[in-house]
Image (cartoon, rainbow, N blue to C red):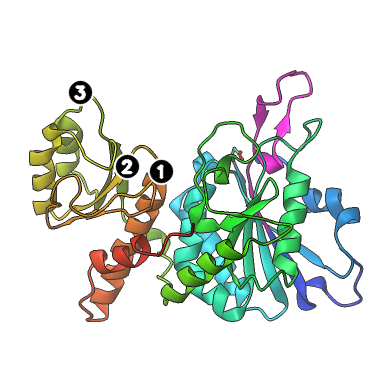
Amino acid sequence: MSSNPTSPEKSPHILVLGMGGTIAGLASQSEDDPRKYQAGQVSVDSLLAHIQSAVPDGIQLVPHQVANINSRNLSDSLLTKLGSTVRDSLANPAVLGIVITHGTDTMEETGLFLQATSGKYAQTLGKRVILTGAMLPANAPQPDGPSNLLDAIRWASTPIDNCPGGIYAVMDGRGCMAMDLAKRHGTALNAPLQDSPSSSVGLINPSWLSGVKALQAVWSEDLPIPKLAEWPWVEILTSHAGARAETINHWLTSDVEGLVLAGSGIGGFHDEWVEPLNQAISHGIALVRTSRTGGGSTYPDIPEKDAPGCMASGTLTAPRARIALQLAINAAKQEKLNGKPLTWQDFFARIASLPEIR
Ligand code: SIN
């Protein structure tokens, strides 16, 4: 954070948005186990002050605290606040790029949300938005947060190997598209992206980069950010041995607008659910089928033909499919208000059919 005679907000800078998480967490000094800590305790100003001497010359950083939470408590209202802050900041010519410090537990949801609502905008402006976090609290003996934050700042601010504007994530020396995040481990330092297509942050992998460009070529239009009262209610239900019809019946009398079904294997669900799910469709509840395995793809009409009103999630995991379905239902409602005929399926398909990066 170099000194500047003018207000830092008005001169070219990297905006660092604080959302909380373990990167801003503190372990009690009386505990010998660093896994016992409180997330979201340290301000983003303090996180930056801690790494200030290692920030490359010429990079000016402006911190802004959006929230300071454990990300397991992420809410619709916070996503609206973060999404609006990102879009408004991207529009500011003084903002060269954005880094977001975030808890890793639900970084996956935020990554998909930002890609779907600001991915095209960031790409068009040639600005990078980088999510990062940590698996160890800020006062652990060897915290991973400072190096992740420095990598994210460098990725956001330097013209690295033709890497275009867009929404990315950086953890443990690797970068991926934020929509590819999937936390698959409770403690590993690379947990949010260990199974995601990614590149080293030091040397960009050309085949990963061409996958990014292929995906961006297809993502042609961002979806609207729901206002607080607009977020549709969507739940995730997991199929399992001994699944009961009641699990679905329960929702038929509720205001739920969508259900994401985390099926077994390639996305099949228990026979006990077939009849109640048909009723859910006739009640106008949107259904998306994904796999509880957390990996691979869920294909249309496999293992059984999908009823009209049920879509396969493609490569979207259940948490990502849930955000995608919320955004798709909301986008379809906005279209209807404008007299246009697009359905939630049209919008959901745009996200679920994006090419996979290998
Ligand atoms: C959180 O998601 O806020 C806690 C866990 C983490 O950041 O790794």
Rendered location of residue 55, percent (x, y): 85, 59
- Between disc 1 and disc 3, the foreground one is 1
Q: Which residue is mark 1?
A: 295
Q: What type is the residue that disc 3 sits on?
A: Gly
What distance separates the C-alpha of mark 1 from that of mark 3? Answer: 23 Å
Residue 264 counted in the magenta span: no
Q: Residues within 10 Å of mark 2 (few under 14, many from 20)?
A: many
Q: Which residue is mark 3?
A: 242
244 relative position to 93: left or right:
left
Looking at the picture, does residue 135 appear above or below residue 2? above
What distance separates the C-alpha of mark 1 from that of mark 2? Answer: 7 Å
Q: Which residue is mark 2?
A: 291
Looking at the picture, does residue 54 appear above or below residue 38? below
Q: What type is the residue that disc 2 sits on?
A: Ser
Q: Which residues are magenta?
A: 17-39
Residue shown at the point (46%, 76%) measured from the top left: 217
Rendered location of residue 74, percent (x, y): 50, 46
Label 2 element class = strand
Sequence order check, earlier mark of 2 and 3: 3
Give residue 22's quadrant in the image. top right
Q: Nearer the viewer, residue 276 or 151?
A: 151
Looking at the picture, does residue 315 appear above or below residue 134? below
21 relative position to 276: left or right:
right
Label 1 element class = loop
Contact check, label 1 and label 2, Cβ < 8 Å: yes
